[in-house]
Amino acid sequence: AGLRQRILHLEGAVQAKDREVDKVQREMASARAAEAEVAARHAALEDAARKLDSEASLVKRRLAQANGSLKMSSQKCARVERAMESAREAEQAAYEQRTQAEAATRAAEAEAAQLRQRLVQSE
C-alpha cells in the first residue's frame, strides 16, 4: 500500500512537471512570436528611417540648389525663399519622423530584451 501511494505520488509529480513543461513551451512559443513581431517592426522602422534619410538628403540638395538661385530678381528671390521655407519644414518633418522611428526602434529593442529576459527567467 505504501509503495502504491509512493507510485501515485510520483506519477502525480510527473504529471505536474509535464504541465509545467507544456506551460513553459507555450510561453516560449509566445515569446518567439513576440520576438519575431518585434524584429519585423524593427525592420520596418529601419526601412522607414532609410527612406527618411533619403528624403532628407533630397531636401538638402534642393536647399543647396535654392541657395544658388538667390541671385535672381527680387520676384524670383521671393519664390525661392518660399520654396526654401517649405523645404525646411519638410526637412524638419522628416527629422521628426526619423526621431520617432528611432524612438520606436529603441522601444521595440527594449521590449525584445524584456521578452528575452522573461524567457530566460521562465527556463
Image (cartoon, grey):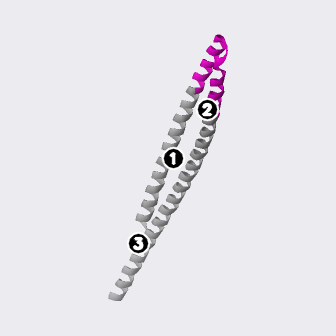
Eye-nearest disc, 1 or 2: 2
Sequence-first disc among 2 and 3:
3
Q: Magenta part of the protein: which range?
A: 58-87
Residue 105's mark?
1
Within 10 Å of disc 3 (Cα), the crowding (few <14, some 14-19, many 20+) is few
Q: CA distance from mark 2 to mark 3?
A: 64 Å
Label 1 sits on what residue type? Thr
CB atoms of marks 2 and 3 within 8 Å:
no
Dot 2 lies on which element?
helix
Sequence-first disc among 3 and 1:
3
Label 3 sits on what residue type? Ala
Compared to residue 99, the image places residue 3 above or below, namely below
Residue assigned mark 2: 60
Q: Position of residue 114 (x, y in %)?
A: 43, 56
Label 2 sits on what residue type? Lys
Q: Is residue 97 visible?
A: yes
